[in-house]
Image (cartoon, coloured by chain):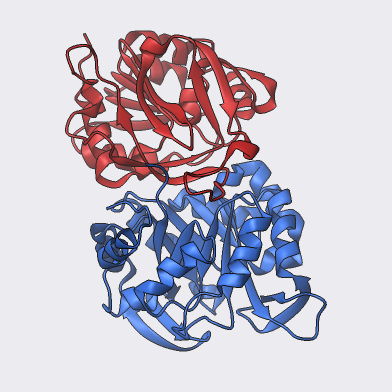
Chain colours: A red, B blue
Amino acid sequence: MSKIDIAVVDYGMGNLRSVSKALEHVAPSKTVVVTSNPDEIIQAARVVFPGQGAMPDCIRELDARGLREAVVAASKTKPFLGICIGLQMLFEHSEEGDADGLGLFKGNVKRFVTEAMVGHDGEKLKVPHMGWNQVYQVHDTHGASHPLWNGIEDGARFYYVHSYYVQPDDESVIAGYSHYPNKFTCAIAQKNLFAVQFHPEKSANAGLQLLSNFVNWSPE
Amino acid sequence: MGLAKRIIPCLDVTDGRVVKGINFLELRDAGDPVEIAKRYDDQGADELTFLDITASSDNRGLILNIIEQVASQVFIPLTVGGGVREVEDVRRLLNAGADKVSINTTAVLNPQMVKAAADRFGSQCIVVAIDAKKVENQPFEWEVFTHGGRKATGLDAVKWAEYMVSLGAGELLVTSMDRDGTKIGFNNPLNKAISDAVEVPLIASGGVGNLQHLVDGVREGGADAVLAASIFHYGEYTVRQAKEYMAQHGIEVRL
């Protein structure tokens, strides 16, 4: 098997072409594979864990393909980027279909409550939360933000499509947040893992910068 | 600050070229799809919509090539509609690089196809396009039309929108057939009636002639996104100018 720089985990839930094309665009010299082979996930230097659709289906399909173990191992050992449902699945439980996730992070995945969806000028806010929203980066006590935010303006807009959001028990893992209308977590980070609710592969320059940062990231 | 209102240039594609029609007739050539898509992306378009209006089934596959090319060069959401008849058509378009697929006539002929597509691929990628016209001879104000505005369906556009969302539509693209190509502005009462009736985002379409129309579409029509073709294709305005104008009028946009 030839060397795999980046494995994009494919468990049959939707189209991963956008993710792989965007990665190839920011890293033209790297080998990007879209794979449902656990060996390739184990072998790859970096792993991207995307997802779309409903979380219960995603977990079911992940297990049906025998990918859970490889994904969990990758999330603990190498640069790992979760996207959208790929963020949500890392948590213990989701309100969507009352489903259990992979349980790597304590906390729940919750739905935007329709009745609360009123904007600052009284307008009705739609669900799904679809479109470009501002992403605020979390800074540590030295004022530094996560290296995956390098070169991205604090408050830059990223493209979202989702009706559920994560609520980590441990706030120290929160790396970014947005408002709709209330503040919600849109990025988490822990050691070699980074995961986002928005779609960097569809977020024009800001998204490509984040993917480029991921491809070049050497977590300590 | 929160979610931005989206500006979506629309590219009508036939036989591999972008065209613009007046009231769905009289097509004029507007250029190469990939070049136009890249230009709009550079100008800050939030999303792009491609409507395949190719008449001959022989040339319908051309849209897949176009989407493949655009999707490897443009990293914003792409919606494709036109001629989507089966779940398999949705799959092909998503695999080519579309993020969302817009279903129009087939939704009327076979509503369960919308449900089947949403169940299989998720509501986030299923847009239902509703072409509506003001009518006098019905117990409701706006009627759904199909086949590019030629066939009346007897359906109330607002009720239809609610039904489509209940089947799994994740977004609605509402085109006023009375306004399309006229440049007199969106049909804001129609859009507002539908936007108020559903939980999912509404894209307003049909009738944009100037930048104030975009502002009105959001303010008066309750649109979450505004779609326009000719004002951008013929260089009357850039997408950036449109966004700056909206921002000056207090609408949150991505600049």
The mark tally for this picture is 0
Asked whether the viewer can see residue B38, the reply is: yes
Of all residues, the one furthest to the bottom in this rendering is B26
Q: Residue at x 42, y 16 (%)?
A: A39
Asked where in the image residue B43 lies, by quadrant, the reply is bottom left
| Rendered-image quadrant of the C terminus of chain A | top left
Asked whether the viewer can see residue B61, the reply is: no
| Rendered-image quadrant of the N terminus of chain A | top left
- Measured as percent of width and height from the top left, residue B79 is found at 47, 57
Q: Residue at x 52, y 66 (%)?
A: B220
| Closer-to-camera residue (B196/A69) | B196
| Closer-to-camera residue (A26/B204) | B204
Please give left or right for residue B220 compared with residue A17 in the image: right
User: Eyeballing the image, is B176 above or below B167?
Assistant: below
Please give left or right for residue A170 compared with residue A117 in the image: left
| Closer-to-camera residue (A192/B32) | A192
Please give left or right for residue A15 compared with residue A93 in the image: left
Please give left or right for residue B10 compared with residue A22 in the image: right
| Closer-to-camera residue (A29/B244) | B244
User: Eyeballing the image, is B19 above or below A93?
Assistant: below
- Measured as percent of width and height from the top left, residue B64 is found at 45, 60
- Measured as percent of width and height from the top left, residue A38 is found at 46, 18
Q: Residue at x 27, y 74 (%)?
A: B237
